[in-house]
Amino acid sequence: MANQTKIVECVPNFSEGRDKEKIERIVNPFRTKQGVKLLNYSNDEDHNRCVVTVIGEPKALTEALYEAIEVAVKEIDMTKHEGQHPRMGAVDVVPFIPIRNMEMDEAIALSKEVGKTIGERFGVPVFLYEKSASAPHRENLAKIRKGQFEGMAEKVHEPEWIPDFGPKDIHPTAGVVAVGARMPLVAYNVNLNTSDLSIADAIAKKVRFIGGGLRFCKAMGVELHDRNIVQVSMNLTDYTKTAVYRAHEMVRMEAKRYGVEVVGSEVIGLVPMMALVQCAEYYLGIENFSEDQILETRLME
Amino acid sequence: MANQTKIVECVPNFSEGRDKEKIERIVNPFRTKQGVKLLNYSNDEDHNRCVVTVIGEPKALTEALYEAIEVAVKEIDMTKHEGQHPRMGAVDVVPFIPIRNMEMDEAIALSKEVGKTIGERFGVPVFLYEKSASAPHRENLAKIRKGQFEGMAEKVHEPEWIPDFGPKDIHPTAGVVAVGARMPLVAYNVNLNTSDLSIADAIAKKVRFIGGGLRFCKAMGVELHDRNIVQVSMNLTDYTKTAVYRAHEMVRMEAKRYGVEVVGSEVIGLVPMMALVQCAEYYLGIENFSEDQILETRLME
């Protein structure tokens, strides 16, 4: 029970969302490896893409990952791939997220080691992105992926888009892959008591980073047709700096001028414990609280 | 990593708070047993008492507990014990608290099994208390302990105080012990911007159970001399039913009539994760949230 095991999360995206048997062959290594836990995987037929969420010890997890990549590189042919979601490779993107007993620096180092191995072992060029990026213009995944698989053969020869690891040319059928480290993402939506989407959009534009809002907040307005209301749908990309409660209160504040009120919220998918504990600390005004006081933290030591 | 290990907490109180070497001999079994984690132990010389906090798998934990009890029964002589804290045995009280993958029923069953073993193996009479009590008048530890060690030799012969397990007479030097199951206790204090203790006392009387307040809340007023303020100091004995935020808001509400405001709060010692997550859920108005969405919960499965 008592140990200081490092735990990393990995969310590899594979460009196969239709062939169930192929998806199973790709996912299988994450089921069978000791020290690795498959949390979730979901495929989207329109996107023709499968997103896997897995946690585990870095060594065991990367071994399972290499096995999955070997299957994907062998079985997915990007020259025949169609799907709505932008993509540039059979293994499209591999983010690492530090979860326990691990600093961001370690996750970055891990992502670089994995990138190097992918380049050498599978002959797929690798772009480091997010916190692992080798230059500021390569941090944003969308910018790296621009041109998609079809444009990559030429793009990798442009001076500013030379891959970080692997061959100089794309893999003929597997394309290229982005590997990097990032913080856990918190998907948090705030519901408003109006059906007017333009209000949710206007608020989203103010609370998000690109509109002059919170540094680690992406946001957009969304309609909830069933309930005849709208929501401000947010991705908080670093909850340690842009706290959930701060995003919540900023939406509430902006909603006021439209005579609109917050009527609930939702957390989508997984959330780190401290992202919610921070909120309890804020609203209760708890002084001098330490994560070590949480019983469950002691169980994981 | 992946398992459904049951985890129980145990907080045995031993009637030795002065002899450091003896305390170490009592505590030592909790350090050395696989599957058991000693979280804390603290002795008080005035109370002449040592409180141990330990978590672990039920089987491993109870084995360590029996070893500790063996030392305590052998080495502590209650006929010579002096201390400010009420006490009735060398091992005064042994509460079990269900932490993970364990219902209260299982903690109750465990406490009864341990009580039976203590009675048989060490010849110390056992009172079941709290959720394990064999009758309502035996739930409250203070009522069981009334008369203390000195009065127990006679008390155990009264019809309503016949022990649940063990011999009919007290152990000559180790007295009797109370064993039972209870919920984790949350020690939560709310600070007020006044130095008037009578205000904190008046509020405490309203929020606590015996004053007509919240069912699982004990409370009293306390002065913080250093800061020249007072606080309502609370013990929440079942946070799943009397939530931290509800106690907090009730203090705030009662404070209003005195023109006094809440200026912070504190959580003392360990707290279950969900006691704080509940507060985030309440203040953010999160809908349809499940504990399984917390990443750390998945790490402990």
Image (spheres, coloured by chain):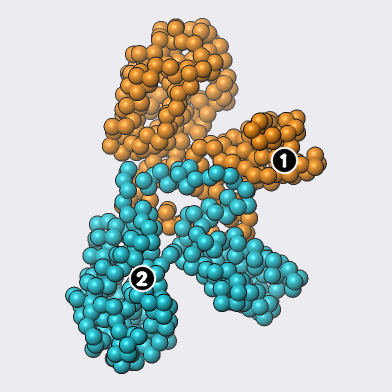
Chain colours: A orange, B cyan
Inspect the image, locate mark 2, and give the three-letter code of the amino acid beneath it.
Answer: Ser
Inspect the image, locate mark 1, and give the three-letter code of the amino acid beneath it.
Answer: Asn
Nearest the viewer among B134 and A261 is B134
Nearest the viewer among A127 and A277 is A277
Q: Residues within 10 Å of mark 1 (few under 14, many from 20)?
A: some
Q: Residue at x 36, y 56 (%)?
A: B102
Residue A36 falls in image quadrant: top left
Residue B295 higher or lower than B111, as above or below: above
Residue B71, horizontal then vertical, whole percent = 23, 76
Element class at badge 2: loop
Q: Residue at x 57, y 55 (%)?
A: B279
- Give the CA distance from mark 1 to mark 2: 48 Å
Residue B251, horizontal then vertical, whole percent = 65, 68
The circle drawn on residue B132 is: 2
The reply to whether the C-beta atoms of the residues labelled 1 and 2 are less than 8 Å apart is: no
Looking at the image, residue A116 sits to the left or right of residue B34; the answer is right
Residue A141 falls in image quadrant: top right
Element class at badge 1: loop
Q: Which residue is mark 1?
A: A193
The circle drawn on residue A268 is: none
- Please state the chain letter of the residue tagged with numbered disc 1 in the rendered image: A
Residue A225, horizontal then vertical, whole percent = 66, 30
Quadrant of the drawing holding the N terminus of chain B? top left
Instruction: State whether residue A241 appears in this view.
Output: no
Residue found at the far left of this picture:
B121
Residue B205 higher or lower than B297, as above or below: below
- Please state the chain letter of the residue tagged with numbered disc 2 in the rendered image: B
Instruction: State whether residue B5 appears in this view.
Output: yes
Q: Do discs 1 and 2 share a chain? A: no
